Amino acid sequence: MDIKQILYQKRMAKNFTSRKEDYSQWYNEIVIKADLADYSAVRGSMVIKPYGYAIWEMMQAALDKKFKDTGHVNAYFPLFIPKSFFSKEAKHVEGFAKECAVVTHYRLKNDETGVVVDPDAKLEEELIVRPTSETIIWDTYKKWVQSWRDLPILVNQWANVVRWEMRTRLFLRTSEFLWQEGHTAHATRLEAEEEAKKMLGVYTDFAENFMAMPVLQGIKTENERFAGALETYCIEALMQDGKALQAGTSHFLGQNFAKAFDVKFLSKENKLEYVWATSWGVSTRLMGALIMTHSDDSGLVLPPKLAPFQVVIVPIYRKEEEKITVIEKGKQIKAELERVGIRVKLDDRDTQKPGFKFAEWEFKGVPLRIAIGPRDITNNTVELARRDTLTKSVTDMEGLREQVLDLLDEIQNNLFAKALDFRNTHTTVVNSWDEFKDVLENKGGFIMAHWDGTSETEEQIKAETKATIRSIPLDYDNSEEGVCVYSGKPSKGRVVFAKSY
């Protein structure tokens, strides 16, 4: 490390809050300083910058392939939804009523004060800016479904949604965000339930094998269930500050929306029946989860499978006559790595010194850095620096491609193992209310505790501690019985409590 890199890193450290100092501020500074997103002129909405959007595109590509591999196809439905559609499913509208943005007029005009809303352009029926698409989609499915031959419908859409938030944080909670939402229609209850569980598995596989983020699978309580669903399956991840984050949900909707929008089909038995439904989705909230699962006090840390650049090559030279030779060798290494599908950035900017580049790409989380200078060319070596361990080594250029491939796999696996170890050491089994409060206050993380199964107890625990039931384990019915830590009443099994985002 040269003196300029040392000085740059010291300057960054001075201007960068550590996790221990202020975890929330640490997170905000990573998002801004790593060029992931920025605040916009619209309150509660964000600008996703090119580097941040590139990560989201990597997520999209991996998920989109998984959806298509399981038989789903993409479509697109309107951003605006007639207000009357929400009135057809009472629980659904109740769940979103306080978060809806409403369009009331369709035209502006100029007057002496400037641009104003034209009072003569009032809509006959207000339009809701999409908070989720069940209503508009099921109104459409009514046209698509007549008989069992039209089922199943396995549709996904990539879209933006608006949920009017008062307290926002970049990626984690914004008034407008990006997501995918799957909406499927089935002939039988069993098919729909299997679909909801299948997509939970898809999300779990993506979280663990691409994001390197271990998750707990489970079911939401009635209080936490998606509005209009009979069952909500979820994956929950644990962030480094000991708070849980809901990383994805898959809903079994039963026949609620089919009945609300009168979507029936003629069965094989020649009977008219209502369709069975699911919906499922993940959003740009996963960007926040990625940051908080892996990043450290040196900045962003990215798992190789989702990094826009898996490798950055930094040429080092002092004399102008060395420049052409070193950059040319960098281009050769770049081409060699790209031949096996590695995403590579050659940073040949003249405007910044190598030390600055080292620190910059380290802060932006690039998994592997290759430094090459005149001496390396003479010795036929390069310097490799790993972002996950912040360690460096010198290696021969011979066999570099295979070594980089192995290192990227090793980094991916190491990040998952590190996150899993954190979750395991921050998952605590408790048997009393005093123990529950002590762990929540002094350690945080997931708390496995008995619950009596009532909404009343769930709400009282939340009111007293701000902890919620993150999920009911999938094996809950076969788990040990006990006594609720709060009420002392009989409990069928332990559930997962935590404070959350």
Image (tube, rainbow, N blue to C red):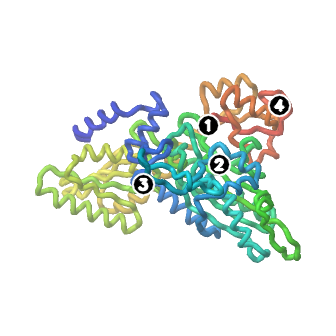
Q: Earlier in the sequence, mark 4 or mark 2?
A: 2
Which mark is drawn over residue 235? 2
Q: Earlier in the sequence, mark 1 or mark 2?
A: 2
Q: Nearer the viewer, mark 4 or mark 2?
A: 2
Q: Nearer the viewer, mark 1 or mark 2?
A: 1
Dot 1 and dot 2 residues touching (CB under 8 Å): no
Q: Is residue 496 visible?
A: yes
Instruction: Give how far apart the Cα atoms at labels 1 and 2 are.
Output: 13 Å
- Picture residue at 80% right of the left edge, 68% below the top: 264
The residue where tag 3 is placed is 407
Amino acid under disc 3: Leu
Q: Nearer the viewer, mark 3 or mark 1?
A: 1
105 to 449, vertically: above or below: below
Helix, strand, or loop for circle 4?
A: strand
Quadrant for the C terminus, please.
top right
Which mark is drawn over residue 483? 4
The residue where tag 1 is placed is 500
Residue 207: percent from the left, percent from the top?
57, 52
Residue 11: percent from the left, percent from the top?
29, 34
Q: How many marks?
A: 4
Q: Earlier in the sequence, mark 3 or mark 1?
A: 3
| Mark 1 Cα-neighbour bin, 10 Å: few <14, some 14–19, many ≥20 | many
Amino acid under disc 4: Val
Dot 3 and dot 1 residues touching (CB under 8 Å): no
Residue 365: percent from the left, percent from the top?
40, 47
471 to 412, vertically: above or below: above
